[in-house]
Amino acid sequence: MLDAYKKAGIAPGDVFAQSFNLADVLYWVKTEPAFGAQAVYLEDRYEKQGLDPNKPDTWKPSMAELKAQGVAILGPPIWTMLTLNDKREIVPSEYAKAAKAAGLDLIGWSLERDGPLHKGGGFYHKSIKSVVDRDGDTLTVLDVLAKQVGVRGMFSDWPATTTFYASCTGMK
């Protein structure tokens, strides 16, 4: 895949190669460092290893270990980056805070994949389901991800929402 980008003359800085397989990302980091510098490890440990975003001992490898191996960007599902505080406000999870503390950039997935939120959303909002009850909560979630979590970007099924948000808040 990366050979095709090179052959086409596409600059490595314009490519965000991504994989759910950590070995792929580590291979790119080692063999194609220009492309590996912004390769995205799409988080799947919640499915395979029972990752709990509020229990660091379930993150194998740890955020610091991922960074030490050369991972620069982690791509987790939205729910892993969010939790509720004791006031029932949406806030960054321990997972999100640890990733940022380790120096990992975050690109979340997938905004608006759950469809209408009047019933609390589904998979992508499961950590905050009890406070999600209307479609406008999409913007609340995006605001927390942008301003408090500090995501680098967001995968979205409807980019008009992220574009609207970025335009209204002066983001690029």
Image (tube, rainbow, N blue to C red):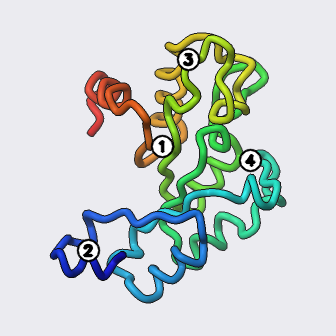
Pointer 3 residue: 116
| The disc label shown at residue 5, or none | 2
N-term mark: 1 or 2: 2
Q: Is residue 9 left or right of residue 37?
A: left
| The disc label shown at residue 70, or none | none
Residue type, mark 2 in image? Tyr
Q: Residue at x 29, y 22 (%)?
A: 168
Q: Residue at x 82, y 51 (%)?
A: 55
Q: Are marks 3 and 2 in contact (CB under 8 Å)?
A: no
Distance CA(mark 1)–CA(mark 3): 25 Å
Q: Is residue 32 left or right of residue 6?
A: right
Q: Nearer the viewer, mark 2 or mark 4?
A: 2
Residue 119 at x, y = what percent? 68, 14
| 41 and 149: which is toward the camera | 41
Q: Is residue 16 left or right of residue 41?
A: left
Q: Residue at x 74, y 53 (%)?
A: 46
Q: Crowding at label 1, few (<14), some or many (≥20) Cα neighbours within 10 Å?
A: some
Q: Crowding at label 2, few (<14), some or many (≥20) Cα neighbours within 10 Å?
A: some
Residue 67 at x, y = what percent? 57, 71
Quadrant of the rendered image containing residue 15:
bottom left
Distance CA(mark 1)–CA(mark 2): 29 Å
Q: Crowding at label 4, few (<14), some or many (≥20) Cα neighbours within 10 Å?
A: many
Residue type, mark 1 in image? Gly
Pointer 1 residue: 150
Pointer 4 residue: 53
